[in-house]
Image (spheres, grey):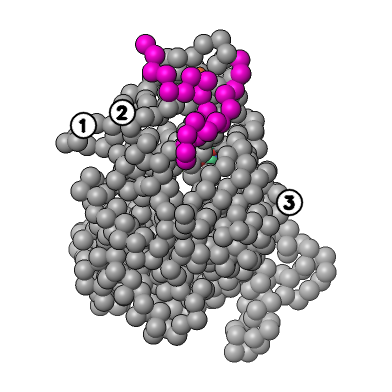
Amino acid sequence: MTEVLLRIEDLVTRFYTELGVVKAVDGNSLHLGEGESLGVVGESGSGKTVTALSVMRLIENPGRIEGGRILFRGEDLLQKSERQMQRIRGKDITMVFQDSLSSLNPTLTIGEQITRVLRFHLRLSRRERWRRAVELLRQVGIPEPEQRVKHYPHQFSGGMRQRALIAMAISCSPQLLILDEPTTALDVTIEAQIFELVEELKRAFRMGTFLITHDLSVVATFCDRVVIMYAGKIVEEAPVTALYDRPLHPYTRGLLGSIPPLEGGKARLDSIPGEVPDLISLPPGCNFSPRCRLADERCWREEPPLEHPGPGRRVACWKAGETGG
Amino acid sequence: MRAYLAKRFLFGVLTLLVTSLLIFSLLRVVPGGPVDALIGEEWDDPELRAQLRRDLGLDLPFHRQYARWLGGLFRGDLGVSLVLYRGEPVGGIILERFGVTAQLAFISLTIALLVAFPAGIAAALWKERLPDHVFRIVALGGISTPNFFLGIALIVMFGVGLRLKWGVGGYVPFGEDPWGWFLRLLLPAIVLGTDHAATISRMLRASILEALGRNHVLTAKAMGLPRKEFLIQDVLRTAMVPVVTVIGNSAGALLDGAVITEILFRLPGLGSLLVQGVYARDLPLVQSVVIVAVGIRIAVNLIVDLSYALMDPRIRYGRGQ
Ligand SMILES: Nc1ncnc2c1ncn2[C@@H]1O[C@H](COP(=O)(O)OP(=O)(O)O)[C@@H](O)[C@H]1O
Ligand code: SF4
Ligand SMILES: [Mg+2]
């Protein structure tokens, strides 16, 4: 058993908008071991990004983290000052975002953007910082790093930009790397290359990775465990193989059903009829009941608790495991 | 980058040519030329009139007159003043007068920027809170007050009310009395600059708010960069790109706006020269003043494009690979 790197307990994050209170993360718990890879999967709007931003303590007005604990190596991040968080962000925990073009500053070179991260976290001379930036670019597979370090983001291709962003994220050897849909904007071959790279880096640095995606096929090759989120709540958790062998939640089965055949392109989630409910006014009972084929009286009335049906597994469904119809 | 600037430059020259033709034709169409101004409309001596027209080259066909003027311009010869400064070369007069206008525009823009930057940044960072509301109201007031009214109000207040020597306008050269020079230019500079301070600060506010929501700001935060670092490098720096254009436009517009202000405050600048020239029907003077003003405006735009390119690497190095 590995050391626990991150443990989230009963996290509640809400946004107080003019239209009402958005329950973006509604009492979730999860954990991640050292060097482990956790996949967080769910349709868009299910609270994945908000969970990650809560860990980074980057929730801003009108959002608030209202409850729970976020233990990073045993210390509660919610008790840290902003100053302490600045030292943790970018050094111990980093995050790579979806769209690499807008995630990089268009007015600074790649080298300037990497070296300024080094400047704030490590004690290195200017020359050492630049040498390290070149080394990092080489490490993430960017050809001719000595030249590339002086280039601006728009001079890179999408895949190379994402590599550069990853180089920046691992520049201070973090223990936890959060990837928020890192390959959505890229085509399938580039996507595979990026995941190969992350896999390599993960092994080299024993980095824990928290991979947010809505693509279960990515999770199958890259992650050890999976958490399925729906409407702000964790509805299922399982080791990857177990999840694929025997999904317990009807929502998970729907997601798995939407994985295209091997030779196909990316998975699409629109095969589950209906939409993610409005997080301001959630339905009574089970959040998934309006879209669930198995839903009955009890599902509409009472919310199913998160139970432990087996080792390493959790599921929140009154009819867990039933396939029905 | 080079191609981009070359293109801009070419456009500038073309614009200048088109406007020169426009000015020239317009001035020939209006009744009452310099001959009338020189000898008076009542003096009815056709012989003398014809003689004068020949001497001044006004009897030549339109295109020959235009070609003469244009040829002069290319050689740097702006012609000779006929009425206002009988016989003096226009170039020298413009140079002298432009100095005053440029000083006024410079002080005006400096004040506008000194006000607009803190105001715009504060309004953005305290969005929808007190500073934002205050600056919004002040800006709206600044834009909607006509310049001539603001000018008269200031003269009444400082010149008439407080009886300050510098409150009623006039001009003192910097070399003679630097402090007096500054004080006399201060009120007209304020009058001229309010609109621009308001526009620039509002633009800056919008631009900062837009930049604050950009993903790379989130990346900067996620990398643990302190507030000061990402506010300057990720927010202000990228927000400046559109603001520079607005500042450039303001710099150009200050020259236009100078006309009323210079007359109001009795400043011997390009604006008042133009008005005097029109009243005196000094054709060569007026057409050259206008073409120089247009030229300056185009040059300012060119400088803006250049700084724009220097600030945004996407323009500097072209798009993609
Ligand atoms: N700044 C914000 N203001 C208001 N609501 C927000 C904000 N950020 C996220 N939300 C809401 O929180 C919910 C979860 O969003 P998110 O975590 O981004 O979803 P996901 O990453 O799973 O697609 C959504 O309903 C979204 O509208
Ligand atoms: S609790 Fe009921 S509605 Fe919810 S997922 Fe299970 S069967 Fe469907
Ligand atoms: Mg998201």
Q: Chain of mark 2?
A: A
Magenta stretch, residue numbers? A301-325
Please state which of residues A4 and A193 is positioned toward the viewer in this rendering: A4
The residue under the point 83% across, 65% down is: B161
* Chief SS of the magenta region: loop
The answer as to whether callout 2 falls within 8 Å of ligand 1 is no
Magenta stretch: residue A324 in it? yes
Pointers 1 and 2 within a single chain: yes
Q: Which residue is mark 3?
A: B130
Q: Label for residue A258?
A: 2
Please state which of residues B208 and B272 is positioned toward the viewer in this rendering: B208
The residue under the point 67% across, 44% down is: A67
- The extreme right residue here reads B162
Please state which of residues A201 and A115 is positioned toward the viewer in this rendering: A201
Q: Amino acid at mark 1?
A: Pro
Magenta stretch: residue A307 in it? yes
The residue under the point 68% across, 57% down is: A79
- Whole-percent x and y of residue A228? 45, 36
Q: Is residue A213 above or below residue A77?
A: above
Q: Residues within 10 Å of mark 2 (few under 14, many from 20)?
A: some
Q: Quadrant of the C terminus of chain A?
A: top left
Residues at marks 3 and 2, CA–CA distance in whole angstroms:
51 Å
Q: Is residue B284 above or below residue B172?
A: above
Residues at marks 3 and 1, CA–CA distance in whole angstroms:
58 Å
